[in-house]
């Protein structure tokens, strides 16, 4: 048999119609491709069987998670080179992608390539998906049960693993690198600055009551109670997060001022709050329920109360109804998660009755945050693998590195939207000076 790497390179270039920008090293130790480029290591034929049965992103994701393929060299550089060929081809809508795929498969050279791939694979037995894949999701999207299962898939993978990746701050959302131009900041300092920025935007004062929707490991409620003297309720759907947050709060001596609940935002029926923070939670809500989400938070605020909604956004597309979630993200990272353009988010908040007062874009900040998380993971890789599974650690490394590039390339963004439940009198309570919270 001819060297596998050369055959695979030829196949890939025939299907893609462009030269392959990375080197390939195959299971027979053969290599092919541009010298000095990052190397795609194909460890076994099982990787090809995964691609044969699930062509495209899902097959590649399964091969990556299972360890059938790897990247040798600069991971960011390799993903940047491959992005145009894999993740950014035909992202506008699934129907055009299917039609384009059918046209490609009808080409004689592609049919010949498929036969060649089968000859390389051997018996085409479909490998089982890696255990880390979210499967058998029950019921319609975004029911209370299904949302709880989706959250558990992502967050209940071990608090020690998250502590390794996130660092001492235990904040799993975009940091605020305010000090970068003045000499730099650590990840922990940048996360503290983000929490404080949220508190200042909300105008928190001693004795006020704060609701933190999607409270994670309790960092926001801890900061708000300790630094601003508020009473706080944090809600999460993750049992592991709740246990961890309660322990931190008890150790800080703040159990009399902070309550952590395992509860869905749709199940809260408390007296109104003075302020609500929702940091990195709204991505889980879903398009069909976003209006309900906005109305629920509006109803939970006192007149004059403020909402800070910190949310990842995607770029608008021509046919919004044709939007689809990347298969890798949906199966391995955030099951059932959906992103919306910032304009749609602001519109939904306004439709619910809010007055949108400020929108701040933090896109570049998230790229820096993700690179810091990837560095933490890579630095302590052996420990990370023992804390979870090799496949799970590989999922996190790929999704965080790819996401960093997506933020840097303006494929996705992240925004803080400050909104007020303005009373009928029109007295919003907002400062006259624009962005007074910036000092």
Image (cartoon, rainbow, N blue to C red):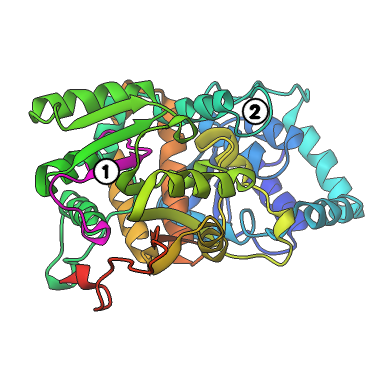
Residue at the location (58% across, 56% down)?
Answer: 33
Q: Residue 146 location in percent, x, y?
A: 58, 26
Question: Would you say the residues marked 2 and 1 are in contact, meaning their CB atoms lie under 8 Å apart?
Answer: no
Q: Quadrant location of the N terminus?
A: top right
Residues 156 and 91: in front is 156
SS of the residue under disc 2: helix
Residue at the location (65% across, 22% down)?
Answer: 138
Residues 350 and 391: in front is 350
On whether residue 124 falls in the magenta region, the answer is no
- In the drawing, does residue 259 fall left or right of residue 263? left
Q: Residue 129 location in percent, x, y?
A: 62, 24
Q: Quadrant location of the C terminus?
A: bottom left
Residue at the location (28% across, 68% down)?
Answer: 430
Q: Mark 1 highlights which residue?
A: 210
Give the farthest residue toward the left.
Answer: 253
**Residue 33 visible here:** yes
On whether residue 207 falls in the magenta region, the answer is yes
Stretch in magenta? 200-220
Residues 255 and 108: in front is 255
To which quarter of the image does residue 68 belong? top right
Q: Residue 26 location in percent, x, y?
A: 58, 39
- In the drawing, does residue 310 fall left or right of residue 292? left
Q: Mark 2 highlights which residue?
A: 46
As drawn, 283 above or below 437: above
SS of the residue under disc 1: strand
Residue at the location (56% across, 59% down)?
Answer: 351
Q: Earlier in the sequence, mark 2 or mark 1?
A: 2
Judge the density around disc 1: few (<14), some (14-19), many (≥20) Cα neighbours within 10 Å. many
Q: What mark, if any, has residue 273 been given in the picture?
A: none
Give the farthest residue toward the bottom.
Answer: 433
Judge the density around disc 2: few (<14), some (14-19), many (≥20) Cα neighbours within 10 Å. many
């Amino acid at each position: 048999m001819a060297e596998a790497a050369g055959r695979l390179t030829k196949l890939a270039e025939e299907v893609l119609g462009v030269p392959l920008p990375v080197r390939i090293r195959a299971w027979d130790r053969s290599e092919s491709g541009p010298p000095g480029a990052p190397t795609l290591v194909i460890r076994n034929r099982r990787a090809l069987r995964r691609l044969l049965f699930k062509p495209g992103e899902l097959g590649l994701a399964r091969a990556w998670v299972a360890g059938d393929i790897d990247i040798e060299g600069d991971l960011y550089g390799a993903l940047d080179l491959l992005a145009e060929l894999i993740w950014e081809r035909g992202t506008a809508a699934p129907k055009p992608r299917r039609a384009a795929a059918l046209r490609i498969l009808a080409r004689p050279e592609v049919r010949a390539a498929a036969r060649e791939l089968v000859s390389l694979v051997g018996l085409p037995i479909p490998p089982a998906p890696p255990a880390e894949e979210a499967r058998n999701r029950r019921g319609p999207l975004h029911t209370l049960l299904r949302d709880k299962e989706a959250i558990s898939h992502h967050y209940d993978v071990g608090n020690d693993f998250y502590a390794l990746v996130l660092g001492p701050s235990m904040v799993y959302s975009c940091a605020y690198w305010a000090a970068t131009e003045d000499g730099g900041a650590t990840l922990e300092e940048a996360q503290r600055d983000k929490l404080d920025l949220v508190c200042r935007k909300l105008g928190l004062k001693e004795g006020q009551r704060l609701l933190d929707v999607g409270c994670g490991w309790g960092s926001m409620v801890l900061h708000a109670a300790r630094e601003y003297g508020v009473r706080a309720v944090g809600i999460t759907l993750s049992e592991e997060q709740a246990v961890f947050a309660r322990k931190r709060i008890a150790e800080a001596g703040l159990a009399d001022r902070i309550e952590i609940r395992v509860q869905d935002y749709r199940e809260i029926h408390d007296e109104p709050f003075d302020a609500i923070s929702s940091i990195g939670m709204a991505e889980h809500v879903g398009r069909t329920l976003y209006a309900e989400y906005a109305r629920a938070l509006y109803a939970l605020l006192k007149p004059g109360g403020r909402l800070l909604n910190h949310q990842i956004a995607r770029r608008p597309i021509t046919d919004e109804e044709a939007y689809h979630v990347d298969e890798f993200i949906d199966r391995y990272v955030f099951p059932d998660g959906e992103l919306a353009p910032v304009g749609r988010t602001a519109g939904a908040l306004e439709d619910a009755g809010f007055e949108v007062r400020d929108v701040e874009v933090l896109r570049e900040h998230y790229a820096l945050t993700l690179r810091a998380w990837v560095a933490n993971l890579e630095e302590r890789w052996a420990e990370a693998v023992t804390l979870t599974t090799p496949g799970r650690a590989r999922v996190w490394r790929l999704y965080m590195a790819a996401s960093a590039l997506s933020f840097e390339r303006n494929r996705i963004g992240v925004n803080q939207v400050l909104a007020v439940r303005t009373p009928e009198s029109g007295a919003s309570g907002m400062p006259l000076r624009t962005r007074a919270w910036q000092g």
